[in-house]
Image (cartoon, rainbow, N blue to C red):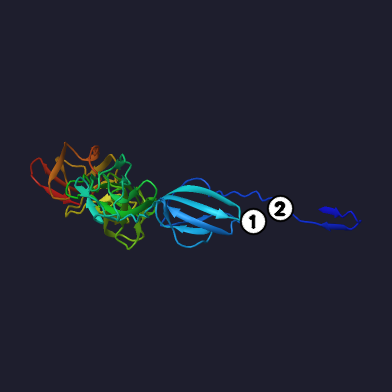
Amino acid sequence: TVLVSTPSGCVGRDTINVVFSSFSVDLGPDRSLCGSSTVLDAGPYAVSCQWTWNGNPLPGNSCQLTANASGTYQVIAQNFAGCSATDQIQVVLGTPLTAIMAGPSTAITGQPVQFTDQTNPPPTQRTWNFGDGSPLVSGNPSPSHTYTQAGIFPVILAVSNGLCTDTAIHLIEVLWDCSSLPLQAAFTYTPNPVDLNAGGGTVYFANTSSGATSYLWLFGTGDTSNQPNPSYAYAQPGDYTVYLIARNYNCTDTFSQVIRVVRAEPNPSTLSYSSPHRLRVYPNPVGEEAFIELPIGGYTWRVELYDGTGRAIRQWEFERGGVWRLDLRELPRGYYSLRASCWGEEPYWGCLLHE
């Protein structure tokens, strides 16, 4: 504000407003990013801007610029008061990657499998993970790998160009070579035979398979089980074919046995013959020993034991009739036949008995 006066006493006055503006531009730190472009902004107080890229002027005077190439960008900006400020920034843009791999969907254990990196554009770094716990493989664009276990494995390819990264996943199912897999189904069972009057017809199975990871039992009645060592109760007499299917992923082996289910009589067994004498064997079924009751007379008895194929496997001779013990230890469970024959003093007479 100024006041003036003249010698004659006249007075004059005037006022002016002066504004000082503090103005600067900050484009931020240098940028390295995965993308095709980034936006540069001179700030909210810039009203007019001139941009250059690597020293080359860019058209327009907008104070926002879409940078779509790597390089050095500089801006000279002016604010509303006409003040100027400048700043520059280094921009590095990475090309986005799409990871792609090629490989088979199935393989066999022990045989090499090849995978190929088909990422476009080609990456500068790559890492393979074959999903089976083996060490990672880096750098190789077409590695091969040999699987030692069956199963479904995720193969992972991770690629990078320093700024951009991507990942591809490929599932491969690895199968056993069944011809070389030591897989065998087998089982035993007790009791043998199965008596509906003793134990309710329940059979206890002992799985003796090797190389299997799962099991399927078929009991011959339509019933099944997946337990390793099941038990099963039969309700009716008969011969039942029991199947055990042992599995190890894609390989199977089958074993079967015929199980005889009977309803044994609790009374002693009587051998059939044409003589008036009576001969008994008990108990029936028997355990480790049986007793045979031979008719009393002046003759000698020979008792023979036959297996299911008709082969004679044991023989006893007794000088006279009476009750005698038959040692049946170490014989496998099953059905057997007895044959008793006799011969005596003069006058000679003979007898033959079977059961």
Q: Residue furthest front?
A: 7
Q: Badge 2: few (under 14), some or many (20 or more) residues near its Cα, within 10 Å?
A: few
Direction from residue 351 to residue 74 in the image, left or right: right
How far across and how far down the image is residue 219, in percent?
Answer: 31, 57
**Amino acid type assigned to the residue bearing label 2 in the image:** Val
Which label number is shown at residue 157?
Answer: none
Q: Is residue 255 visible?
A: no
Q: Identify the residue at horizontal 31%, vertical 54% (top origin).
A: 171
Disc on the earlier residue, 2 or 1 = 2
Asked if labels 1 and 2 touch by Cβ distance under 8 angstroms, the answer is yes
Q: Identify the residue at horizontal 53%, vertical 57% (top origin).
A: 49
Q: Residue furthest right?
A: 9
Q: Identify the residue at horizontal 32%, vertical 62% (top origin).
A: 221
Of residues 199 and 141, the one drawn nearer to the viewer in this rendering: 141
**Amino acid type assigned to the residue bearing label 1 in the image:** Ala
How far across and how far down the image is residue 296, in percent?
Answer: 21, 42
How far apart are labels 2 and 1 at the CA level?
Answer: 9 Å
How far across and how far down the image is residue 138, in percent?
Answer: 29, 42
* Residue highlighted by disc 2: 19
Total numbered labels placed on residues in the image = 2
Of residues 316 and 70, the one drawn nearer to the viewer in this rendering: 70
* Residue highlighted by disc 1: 81
Of residues 182 and 306, the one drawn nearer to the viewer in this rendering: 182
How far across and how far down the image is residue 312, in percent?
Answer: 13, 44
In this rendering, the answer to whether 330 lies above or below 251 is above
Direction from residue 321 to residue 284 in the image, left or right: right
Which of the 4 quarters of the picture holds residue 235? bottom left
Q: Badge 1: few (under 14), some or many (20 or more) residues near its Cα, within 10 Å?
A: few
Kind of element beneath mark 1: loop
Q: Is residue 330 visible?
A: yes
